[in-house]
Image (cartoon, helix red, strand yellow):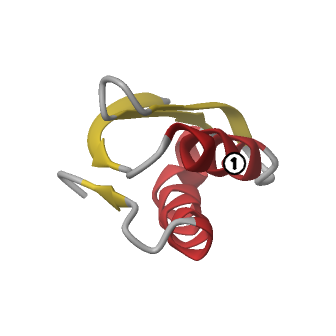
Amino acid sequence: MKKKYDCEIDCANCAAEVQDAISKINGVQSAKVNFMMQKFTLEAEDERFDEILKEAIRIGKTIEPDFKVMGV
């Protein structure tokens, strides 16, 4: 499953770090955090998507405390 979300992130370097960390989660097929567009795209296993999304947000907030994903 692949979903796009609006997000808030404060810097391009943080976006790259968050993207790299989320990409390493077991079950993630791809992850993109676009600082300029303030978009977060996650592609992950259908059956675990919600669980993976929660983990991705948790990891994102660990790296960048102001990281927010809208519509979750």
Seen from the viewer's position, the closer of residues 45 and 64 is: 64
Q: Position of residue 49 (x, y in %)?
A: 52, 50
Q: Position of residue 52 (x, y in %)?
A: 58, 57
Q: Position of residue 10 (x, y in %)?
A: 38, 52
In the rendered view, tell whether residue 66 sits above or below residue 35: below
Q: Position of 34 compared to 39: left or right?
A: right
The residue located at (74%, 42%) in the rendering is: 20
The residue located at (34%, 30%) in the rendering is: 4
The residue located at (69%, 48%) in the rendering is: 17
Crowd around label 1: few <14 · some 14–19 · many ≥20 (10 Å) = some
- Total labels: the figure holds 1
The residue located at (61%, 38%) in the rendering is: 44
Q: Position of residue 43 (x, y in %)?
A: 56, 31
Determine the secondary structure under disc 1: helix
Seen from the viewer's position, the closer of residues 72 and 37 is: 37
Seen from the viewer's position, the closer of residues 19 and 10 is: 10
Q: Quadrant of residue 55?
A: bottom right
Quadrant of the snapshot with the C terminus: bottom left
In the rendered view, tell whether residue 71 sits above or below residue 60: above
Residue ID for mark 1: 17
Q: What is the three-letter code of the residue carrying label 1?
A: Glu
